[in-house]
Amino acid sequence: MDKIPGFMARRPGSFSAAMARKSDPYLPTHINTKPRAKFQVRALLGHCLYRRVVVWTIFFLVLLTVALFDPRFTAQSRNVLDMVHGNKGLIKETPSGMENVPLQNQGSINIYPPKQEVIHEVQLGLNNDVIEDVVEDAPNDILNDVSSDASGDTPNDTLDDIPNDIPDIPDVALIDESVRHEQETEEDIEGDNGPKWLRYKHLDGYYRGLRALVQPPGYKPEYPKPSMSASEPMPTPHHTDMPTPAIYRPHPDYNSDSWQKSYVHVNPCYVDPDKQVPAPDLYAYRGLVQGQPKAALGSHAALGLRDDVCFDRFGRYGPYGLGYSVDRGGLSESLDTESEGSETVWEQSGQINWNAVDWAEAQAECFNSNQGRFFTGNQTRDAELASTGLKKLHRTAIVVRTYVGFKWTAHAVLNFRAMISELNLQSGGEYDVHFLLHVRDNNAPIWADTTTAQEMIESNVPAEFHGLCTLWSEAQMKLFYPGNFGDTFENPSNGDIHGVYRSAHMPLQYFAVMHPEYEHFWNWEMDMRWTGSYYELFDRLGKWGAKQSRVGAWERSAKYYVPGLHGTWENFIQLVNNEILLSRRRPLLGPVSFPGKVALNQGEDFMPATCTTGSEISQCGVGEEADLITLNPLFDADESGWVFAGDVTGYETTLPKPPRRCSIVTASRLSRRLLLVMHEETWRLHHSMFAEMFPSTIAFHRGLKAVFAPHPVFLDRDWPQAEIDKAFNGGVDHSSSGRGSPFDLNNEHNHKGTTWYYNSEFAGLLWRRWLGYAQMDGRGENGGRAGEGAMRGGREEEQDPASSGRLCLRSMLVHPIKWEDPAEKDD
Ligand SMILES: *[C@@H]1O[C@H](CO)[C@@H](O)[C@H](O)[C@H]1NC(C)=O
Ligand SMILES: *[C@@H]1O[C@H](CO)[C@@H](O)[C@H](O)[C@H]1NC(C)=O
């Protein structure tokens, strides 16, 4: 028992029981119902019309009550008020804090069973050449200077020099704006058949498995349909032997000559303090499942993510403890799912015993042994480092927002093991992972008493992550950002200005102030998953951001990129530049001015040398790291119908609201310099805005570089391409901004069939099918919705020799994942 403290802490026993005793509204059961509650408060308070209706209804009920003294009416009116009031306290599950309280974890790690035994069970050498292939194919230029490897997708046109006719782009992308403004009618949204998209056929290719794997030249996606050319249908194979996965390494080849020539040597990192257990590799399959749909929004190609490999649950998570039992050091997850051929993933590393791992220690040791590779955050020192010897790198922190009462599961543990191993251990310390733990009880003496702080961590976070936690509370934010924040234009959530629901950025700003060693900060959430390697995701997003020109960046970032309609990313850049001309609006570049704007102490000189007059304007910002990378469009919140668009504090309310940009879902990368500007805006100018709006708006005001990264997002149904554009770019100038925005309360339903949006129904379904659990397929009369239809997938179906086996998906982000193993669902 003593040997596996971490595990004991997060199993149903003591830990969950302790959770269950508290009647905290943020416990998981509450989380499951939250989206609906949020919707209600938005519906009631977000719309002028609805607000009027509610106000009048209440007024009417009160009148009736007074007039009739009928107790039933009294009760009813109170219910309405309770509903509104009850929703005020809603808090998002993102939150976090500030004082590192590391805890020690004893014990060592060993491999169980011993390596040789595992190897004996599988055919040795079977996949050695495949491994080589994949490794060799991995791009080797990964950490090269961005400016020097900017190949191909750099825009080469200036705003004055845009071709009038754009080849390769179907006319539909340029249809008249008046047509686009036809909003879905009430009938579309609430008619007998529900929203229009419910009537599109479901796609099936996602659920096909490894026995239908094909090599890329033979791959034909089910969606989007191959155009005109009615080529003969590609046969779907049915392999009788399961294909073999190969080690997948998206990291640079640290041993290559080219690396050694330019960069400081990378020392390998280990899971254990005795350096016996190297960080394991993850595995991928070379090829794609025949028919699997392509992303409808965004793409792998645009971001430099590999699109010719797929991942199954064992290749992704097996190295970190999926698929073997607790007494062997695993997590006993997926023992009850189909698993043919899964042994390969333990062939090299053995099944690692993770029971006593201490991630803080492993991460710190990895960085310590590689310190010479990185800038330090000390400007004097960094100037010296930059001028001598081999190239140095900046470091990035992944700041995961968690909170007291979050229910940890085995799958959550797997996810963060993968994150730390891939981002820190396998990169020689380029990234660190931190948990910002939001302590909701403002009366808990977490700063005065280390025992209290320690208990807070022990009862809310598995032992293996204890040393990565930083606590924070709203009371602390009130102390850190004191003073009068002035008037707010609108406060639909009725939350406190220091509260996490409205100002989740405050603790992140503080974190940046306290951690000068990091240049970039990814704000991340507990209910996000990525099927591929985390290093590939974050590294390629960063590289891509640096390559983007600032010219047209705000306009491109306001628009969903639909590759089936817009062609390549280069086409898309041209298309947007053309739309800017057609719109007759001034292109957005550099800081914006607006009535009442106040200067920063630190000035506003954030434009890089590439943007100075005399330079080629299209190169403005190329090679400059992005200050903000978001994973949803950066839309103009004004008149967008987004519920919190008016939650703007500290600006002169007699003037018009300042111009705003916003990106829903707060997962994003922020630069130190952006966070420090936000910090000054907060402490000195007492500015704040709703959390999804503040970072992007401040970047917009001050002329920092911001980009929306069009990562691959999939749709569960066969949407016509033009309908995607209409629904997701139905706002001003064919974008997601302003009137007609997809983020309008009335339009958000369109995201339910996507893999990435806070209200997505498809993300969880697909993720759980991929994990091997049977799921209701969401099909049925009137289009079907989450939880409807027939039970599909799972062990029996995947084991059936006639089926195509377990799922293998290309890399993709999924959100929100509120539960994974069905056994967790109603705990
Ligand atoms: C960019 O434009 C210049 C001048 O028109 C041309 O010589 C060059 O080949 C172009 N580069 C690319 C990548 O298209
Ligand atoms: C920063 O680096 C310089 C040069 O290495 C050093 O002299 C100085 O003490 C450092 N400052 C701090 C605050 O560590």
Image (spheres, rainbow, N blue to C red):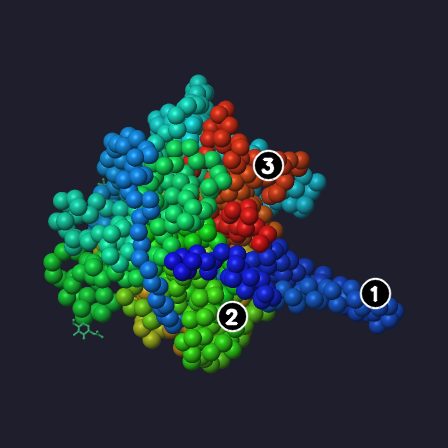
Which comes before the other along the chain, label 3 or label 2?
A: 2
Q: Which residue is mark 2?
A: 440
Across and down, in percent, residue 293 comes to 46, 34
Which comes before the other along the chain, label 1 or label 3?
A: 1
186 relative to 217 in the view: left or right:
right
Amino acid type for the residue under numbered disc 3:
Met
Q: Residue at x 51, y 47 (%)?
A: 820
Which comes before the other along the chain, label 1 or label 2?
A: 1
Check whether the beta carbons of the residues at disc 3 and disc 2 lie within 8 A of each other.
Answer: no
Q: Residue at x 26, y 46 (%)?
A: 251
Q: Reply above or below: 294 against 41.
A: above
Asked whether residue 578 is in view, the answer is: no
Asked whether residue 211 is in view, the answer is: yes
Across and down, in percent, residue 321 comes to 39, 47
Marks 3 and 2 sit apart, C-alpha to C-alpha, by 39 Å
Amino acid type for the residue under numbered disc 1:
Arg
